Image (tube, rainbow, N blue to C red):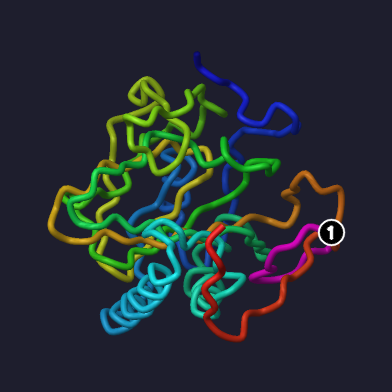
Amino acid sequence: MPITDALPDMPRVLEFFPATNDAPQKLTRAQIRQFNTQGYICPLDVFTPAQAAANRRYFDALMAAAKAHGHNSYSINGWHRHCRGIYDLLHEPRILDYVQDLLGPNLVSVMTHYFCKEPGEQKQVSWHQDASYWPLTPSKVVTAWLAIDDVDEENGPMTAIPGSHLHGQIPFEHSTAAEQNVLGQSVHDPLRWGGEPVAFTMRAGQLSLHTDLLLHGSAPNRSTRRRCGLTLRYMPPEVRTRQEQGANGYICRGSDPSGYWINLPVPASDTVPPKA
Protein backbone atom coordinates (compact mmCIF):
# COMPACT_ATOMS: atom_id res chain seq x y z
CA MET A 1 0.00 0.00 0.00
CA PRO A 2 1.56 3.34 -0.99
CA ILE A 3 2.59 5.62 1.86
CA THR A 4 2.14 9.36 1.45
CA ASP A 5 3.59 10.58 4.75
CA ALA A 6 6.81 9.07 6.03
CA LEU A 7 6.71 10.99 9.33
CA PRO A 8 3.04 11.50 10.24
CA ASP A 9 3.97 12.56 13.78
CA MET A 10 5.89 15.63 12.55
CA PRO A 11 4.23 18.46 10.59
CA ARG A 12 6.48 19.23 7.63
CA VAL A 13 6.47 21.49 4.60
CA LEU A 14 7.43 19.27 1.69
CA GLU A 15 7.61 21.40 -1.41
CA PHE A 16 10.41 22.65 -3.63
CA PHE A 17 11.74 26.14 -2.94
CA PRO A 18 13.47 27.46 -6.08
CA ALA A 19 16.90 29.00 -5.76
CA THR A 20 16.82 32.77 -6.32
CA ASN A 21 20.18 34.37 -7.03
CA ASP A 22 20.67 37.20 -9.49
CA ALA A 23 24.42 37.37 -8.89
CA PRO A 24 25.84 33.85 -8.42
CA GLN A 25 29.53 33.69 -7.64
CA LYS A 26 30.37 30.12 -8.67
CA LEU A 27 27.43 28.64 -10.57
CA THR A 28 26.11 30.12 -13.78
CA ARG A 29 22.59 31.43 -14.09
CA ALA A 30 21.88 28.59 -16.51
CA GLN A 31 22.98 26.05 -13.89
CA ILE A 32 20.69 27.64 -11.32
CA ARG A 33 17.81 27.49 -13.81
CA GLN A 34 18.58 23.81 -14.36
CA PHE A 35 18.55 23.16 -10.63
CA ASN A 36 15.14 24.81 -10.38
CA THR A 37 13.58 23.05 -13.37
CA GLN A 38 15.37 19.67 -13.32
CA GLY A 39 16.31 19.35 -9.64
CA TYR A 40 20.04 18.81 -10.06
CA ILE A 41 23.36 20.04 -11.46
CA CYS A 42 26.02 17.60 -12.67
CA PRO A 43 28.98 17.48 -12.98
CA LEU A 44 30.89 20.26 -11.23
CA ASP A 45 34.66 20.38 -10.89
CA VAL A 46 36.10 20.55 -7.36
CA PHE A 47 39.32 18.58 -6.78
CA THR A 48 42.34 18.14 -9.03
CA PRO A 49 43.28 14.55 -10.01
CA ALA A 50 46.01 14.55 -7.34
CA GLN A 51 43.58 15.77 -4.70
CA ALA A 52 40.97 13.23 -5.81
CA ALA A 53 43.60 10.49 -5.40
CA ALA A 54 44.27 11.77 -1.87
CA ASN A 55 40.52 11.64 -1.10
CA ARG A 56 40.49 8.03 -2.32
CA ARG A 57 43.48 7.07 -0.16
CA TYR A 58 41.80 8.65 2.85
CA PHE A 59 38.61 6.68 2.24
CA ASP A 60 40.54 3.45 1.64
CA ALA A 61 42.27 3.77 5.02
CA LEU A 62 39.05 4.72 6.80
CA MET A 63 37.14 1.84 5.20
CA ALA A 64 39.85 -0.61 6.24
CA ALA A 65 39.64 0.64 9.81
CA ALA A 66 35.84 0.50 9.72
CA LYS A 67 35.79 -3.10 8.50
CA ALA A 68 38.31 -4.06 11.18
CA HIS A 69 35.72 -2.85 13.71
CA GLY A 70 32.88 -4.85 12.12
CA HIS A 71 31.36 -2.15 9.91
CA ASN A 72 30.41 -2.63 6.26
CA SER A 73 30.83 -0.51 3.13
CA TYR A 74 27.72 1.59 3.91
CA SER A 75 28.41 2.12 7.63
CA ILE A 76 30.33 5.39 7.41
CA ASN A 77 27.22 7.45 8.04
CA GLY A 78 27.37 10.61 10.13
CA TRP A 79 31.04 10.11 10.93
CA HIS A 80 31.88 13.77 10.29
CA ARG A 81 31.35 14.09 14.05
CA HIS A 82 34.17 11.59 14.68
CA CYS A 83 36.54 11.94 11.72
CA ARG A 84 38.46 15.11 10.99
CA GLY A 85 38.96 14.12 7.35
CA ILE A 86 35.21 13.97 6.69
CA TYR A 87 34.67 17.15 8.71
CA ASP A 88 37.22 18.90 6.47
CA LEU A 89 35.47 17.70 3.30
CA LEU A 90 32.15 18.92 4.69
CA HIS A 91 33.72 22.35 5.19
CA GLU A 92 35.62 22.45 1.87
CA PRO A 93 35.29 26.07 0.60
CA ARG A 94 35.05 25.06 -3.07
CA ILE A 95 32.02 22.89 -2.29
CA LEU A 96 30.43 25.52 -0.05
CA ASP A 97 30.85 28.11 -2.81
CA TYR A 98 28.61 26.07 -5.11
CA VAL A 99 25.99 25.37 -2.44
CA GLN A 100 25.92 28.99 -1.29
CA ASP A 101 24.75 30.04 -4.74
CA LEU A 102 21.66 27.87 -4.21
CA LEU A 103 20.90 28.30 -0.51
CA GLY A 104 22.44 31.59 0.52
CA PRO A 105 25.37 32.60 2.72
CA ASN A 106 24.39 30.68 5.86
CA LEU A 107 24.86 26.91 5.60
CA VAL A 108 24.20 24.21 8.21
CA SER A 109 24.87 20.46 7.99
CA VAL A 110 23.84 17.49 10.09
CA MET A 111 24.40 14.62 7.64
CA THR A 112 27.18 12.91 5.68
CA HIS A 113 27.33 9.38 4.29
CA TYR A 114 29.78 7.40 2.15
CA PHE A 115 27.92 5.17 -0.33
CA CYS A 116 30.46 2.56 -1.36
CA LYS A 117 29.36 -0.10 -3.84
CA GLU A 118 31.86 -2.92 -3.97
CA PRO A 119 32.56 -4.57 -7.36
CA GLY A 120 29.96 -7.14 -8.34
CA GLU A 121 27.69 -6.61 -5.34
CA GLN A 122 23.93 -7.03 -5.63
CA LYS A 123 22.70 -4.15 -3.47
CA GLN A 124 20.91 -1.23 -5.07
CA VAL A 125 19.47 2.08 -3.94
CA SER A 126 15.79 1.96 -4.89
CA TRP A 127 14.01 5.03 -6.26
CA HIS A 128 13.38 7.46 -3.42
CA GLN A 129 13.30 11.08 -2.27
CA ASP A 130 15.73 12.07 0.46
CA ALA A 131 13.21 14.34 2.18
CA SER A 132 10.93 11.36 2.88
CA TYR A 133 13.50 10.01 5.35
CA TRP A 134 14.44 13.12 7.26
CA PRO A 135 12.69 14.76 10.25
CA LEU A 136 13.40 18.21 8.82
CA THR A 137 11.16 21.06 7.70
CA PRO A 138 10.89 22.84 5.34
CA SER A 139 12.43 20.67 2.60
CA LYS A 140 15.38 22.88 1.67
CA VAL A 141 18.27 20.42 1.91
CA VAL A 142 20.76 20.23 -0.96
CA THR A 143 22.96 17.16 -1.30
CA ALA A 144 26.47 17.50 -2.68
CA TRP A 145 27.51 14.05 -4.00
CA LEU A 146 31.31 13.92 -4.21
CA ALA A 147 32.77 11.23 -6.46
CA ILE A 148 35.55 9.36 -4.65
CA ASP A 149 35.92 6.93 -7.57
CA ASP A 150 35.19 7.43 -11.26
CA VAL A 151 31.48 6.87 -11.87
CA ASP A 152 30.19 5.59 -15.20
CA GLU A 153 27.22 3.71 -16.62
CA GLU A 154 28.70 0.34 -15.67
CA ASN A 155 29.37 0.68 -11.94
CA GLY A 156 25.98 1.80 -10.66
CA PRO A 157 25.79 5.60 -11.01
CA MET A 158 23.23 7.62 -9.16
CA THR A 159 20.36 8.18 -11.58
CA ALA A 160 17.63 10.82 -11.30
CA ILE A 161 14.22 11.61 -12.73
CA PRO A 162 14.42 15.22 -13.95
CA GLY A 163 11.57 17.43 -12.76
CA SER A 164 10.30 14.94 -10.17
CA HIS A 165 11.11 17.39 -7.36
CA LEU A 166 8.21 19.59 -8.43
CA HIS A 167 5.59 17.09 -7.19
CA GLY A 168 6.21 17.42 -3.46
CA GLN A 169 6.37 14.14 -1.57
CA ILE A 170 5.82 11.15 -3.87
CA PRO A 171 4.03 8.05 -2.52
CA PHE A 172 6.33 5.11 -1.76
CA GLU A 173 6.29 1.63 -0.24
CA HIS A 174 8.55 0.03 2.30
CA SER A 175 11.21 -2.00 0.50
CA THR A 176 11.15 -5.79 0.51
CA ALA A 177 14.16 -7.95 1.32
CA ALA A 178 14.16 -9.19 -2.28
CA GLU A 179 15.00 -5.69 -3.53
CA GLN A 180 18.31 -5.67 -1.62
CA ASN A 181 17.81 -1.96 -1.08
CA VAL A 182 20.55 -0.15 0.83
CA LEU A 183 17.82 2.11 2.24
CA GLY A 184 14.22 1.29 3.15
CA GLN A 185 11.81 3.04 0.79
CA SER A 186 10.86 2.34 -2.82
CA VAL A 187 8.96 4.34 -5.45
CA HIS A 188 7.92 1.76 -8.03
CA ASP A 189 6.67 3.97 -10.86
CA PRO A 190 9.44 6.57 -11.29
CA LEU A 191 8.75 7.53 -14.91
CA ARG A 192 5.32 8.78 -13.89
CA TRP A 193 6.94 11.70 -12.10
CA GLY A 194 9.25 13.33 -14.65
CA GLY A 195 11.49 12.96 -17.65
CA GLU A 196 13.74 10.14 -18.79
CA PRO A 197 16.27 8.96 -16.18
CA VAL A 198 19.63 10.74 -16.21
CA ALA A 199 22.77 8.99 -14.92
CA PHE A 200 25.22 11.14 -12.97
CA THR A 201 28.50 10.03 -14.51
CA MET A 202 31.56 11.82 -13.09
CA ARG A 203 35.28 11.68 -12.68
CA ALA A 204 36.69 11.24 -9.20
CA GLY A 205 36.88 14.68 -7.61
CA GLN A 206 33.78 16.01 -9.36
CA LEU A 207 30.49 16.82 -7.69
CA SER A 208 26.76 16.77 -8.31
CA LEU A 209 24.10 18.78 -6.49
CA HIS A 210 20.47 17.77 -6.05
CA THR A 211 17.45 18.89 -4.08
CA ASP A 212 16.02 16.67 -1.34
CA LEU A 213 12.79 16.14 -3.32
CA LEU A 214 14.48 14.81 -6.46
CA LEU A 215 13.51 11.20 -7.19
CA HIS A 216 16.69 9.17 -7.62
CA GLY A 217 18.32 5.79 -7.07
CA SER A 218 21.09 3.57 -8.40
CA ALA A 219 21.41 0.06 -9.81
CA PRO A 220 23.77 -2.61 -8.44
CA ASN A 221 27.44 -2.32 -9.32
CA ARG A 222 27.94 -5.22 -11.70
CA SER A 223 31.35 -4.05 -12.86
CA THR A 224 34.78 -5.09 -11.59
CA ARG A 225 35.42 -1.57 -10.23
CA ARG A 226 34.32 0.03 -6.98
CA ARG A 227 31.93 3.00 -7.00
CA CYS A 228 32.18 5.24 -3.96
CA GLY A 229 30.70 8.66 -3.34
CA LEU A 230 30.40 10.89 -0.29
CA THR A 231 27.10 12.69 0.32
CA LEU A 232 27.37 16.05 2.07
CA ARG A 233 24.01 17.54 3.04
CA TYR A 234 23.50 21.29 3.49
CA MET A 235 20.55 23.48 4.44
CA PRO A 236 19.82 27.07 5.45
CA PRO A 237 19.54 27.61 9.22
CA GLU A 238 15.76 28.21 9.11
CA VAL A 239 15.29 24.45 8.64
CA ARG A 240 14.10 22.79 11.87
CA THR A 241 14.12 19.31 13.40
CA ARG A 242 11.72 17.84 15.96
CA GLN A 243 13.56 19.79 18.65
CA GLU A 244 11.96 23.09 19.57
CA GLN A 245 15.33 24.68 20.28
CA GLY A 246 19.02 23.87 20.54
CA ALA A 247 19.57 21.37 17.72
CA ASN A 248 23.13 20.16 17.15
CA GLY A 249 24.93 20.36 13.82
CA TYR A 250 27.69 22.29 12.13
CA ILE A 251 27.34 25.84 10.86
CA CYS A 252 29.59 25.30 7.85
CA ARG A 253 29.45 28.87 6.57
CA GLY A 254 28.04 32.15 7.83
CA SER A 255 25.91 32.06 10.96
CA ASP A 256 22.51 31.20 12.39
CA PRO A 257 20.90 34.48 13.39
CA SER A 258 18.18 32.63 15.32
CA GLY A 259 20.62 30.69 17.50
CA TYR A 260 18.72 27.44 16.89
CA TRP A 261 21.71 25.47 15.59
CA ILE A 262 24.52 24.70 18.05
CA ASN A 263 27.91 23.66 16.70
CA LEU A 264 29.15 20.22 17.67
CA PRO A 265 32.79 19.85 18.76
CA VAL A 266 35.33 19.68 15.94
CA PRO A 267 36.93 16.20 15.79
CA ALA A 268 40.68 16.36 16.41
CA SER A 269 41.46 13.14 14.54
CA ASP A 270 39.82 10.15 12.85
CA THR A 271 38.04 7.88 15.31
CA VAL A 272 36.01 4.83 14.27
CA PRO A 273 32.82 4.78 16.36
CA PRO A 274 31.73 1.44 17.82
CA LYS A 275 29.33 -0.69 15.82
CA ALA A 276 25.75 -0.13 17.00
Q: Nearer the viewer, residue 268 or 167?
A: 268
* Label tally: 1
Q: Position of residue 156 (x, y in %)?
A: 24, 48
Q: Compared with residue 276, is residue 149 higher up or lower down, i.e. above or below?
A: below
- In the image, the segment drawn in magenta is 247-258
Q: Position of residue 275 (x, y in %)?
A: 53, 62
Q: Nearer the viewer, residue 99 or 109?
A: 109
Q: Compared with residue 50, is residue 232 higher up or lower down, i.e. above or below?
A: above
Q: Residue at x 36, y 59 (%)?
A: 73
Q: Residue at x 70, y 71 (%)?
A: 254
Instruction: Residue lying at the far top in this picture: please name it.
Output: 1
Residue indicated by mark 1: 246
Q: Position of residue 251 (x, y in %)?
A: 69, 68
Q: Quadrant of the C terminus?
A: bottom right
Q: Residue at x 65, y 63 (%)?
A: 107
Indicate the secondary structure of the residue bearing disc 1: loop
Q: Position of residue 215 (x, y in %)?
A: 43, 35
Instruction: Residue lying at the far left in this picture: please name it.
Output: 224
Q: Quadrant of residue 22?
A: bottom right
Classed neighbour count for the residue bearing mark 1: other residues with Cα under 10 Å, few (<14), some (14–19), many (≥20): few
Q: Residue at x 44, y 35 (%)?
A: 128
Residue 2 part of the magenta-drawn span = no
Q: Nearer the viewer, residue 116 or 39?
A: 116
Q: Compared with residue 33, is residue 175 higher up or lower down, i.e. above or below?
A: above
The amino acid marked with disc number 1 is: Gly
| 262 horizontally vs 74: left or right | right
| 123 horizontally vs 267: left or right | left
Residue 254 part of the magenta-drawn span = yes
